[in-house]
Image (cartoon, rainbow, N blue to C red):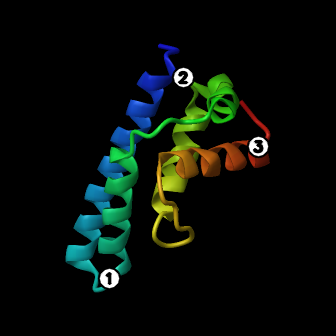
Amino acid sequence: MSDPDTHIDLIADKLTHTAIWRRNLAETYADPRNVTAAVQLDAIAEDRSVIDDDTIAALAPYFNTHTLHVVTSECARDVGFRCRVKGMQEFLALAVARLAAKGEK
């Protein structure tokens, strides 16, 4: 599975699941950031604007790797808390930056 659109769809699914997790946390903890984060995650997951070629090229070596799974999970958990991301392009750029910082495949 190396089609970029398929991988973007999988990342969007991860964002949707993280939004559900955040909503569940909001029921347990009185931290309004959980609801805000869930809304942001849903918006990112639904964003189907064009992802630039440089971002896809930077992600491509990590497709089908555990590293990409871990980094996108970390980034998703940070949305609404440690970072503000306005769309899928920005989310993927954040993931690319973290992948580069890790320096592994």
Q: CA distance from mark 3 to mark 1?
A: 32 Å
Question: Given the image, on which type of amino acid does mark 1 rest?
Answer: Pro
| Quarter-of-image position of residue 5 | top left
The numbered disc on residue 69 is none
Residue highlighted by disc 3: 100
Give the residue drawn at x 23%, y 66%.
24
Query: What residue is shown with label 1?
Result: 32
Q: Is residue 31 left or right of residue 56?
A: left
Quick check: 24 above or below 103?
A: below
Query: Could you say whether the residue bearing mark 2 is in a helix, strand or loop?
Result: loop
- Give the amino acid type for the residue marked by disc 3 in the picture: Ala
- Residue 73 place in picture, x, y as percent: 49, 49
Say which label, 3 or 1, has the lower sequence index: 1
Q: Earlier in the sequence, mark 2 or mark 1?
A: 1
* Mark 2 neighbour density, 10 Å: few (under 14) some (14–19) many (20 or more): few
Badge number at residue 64: 2
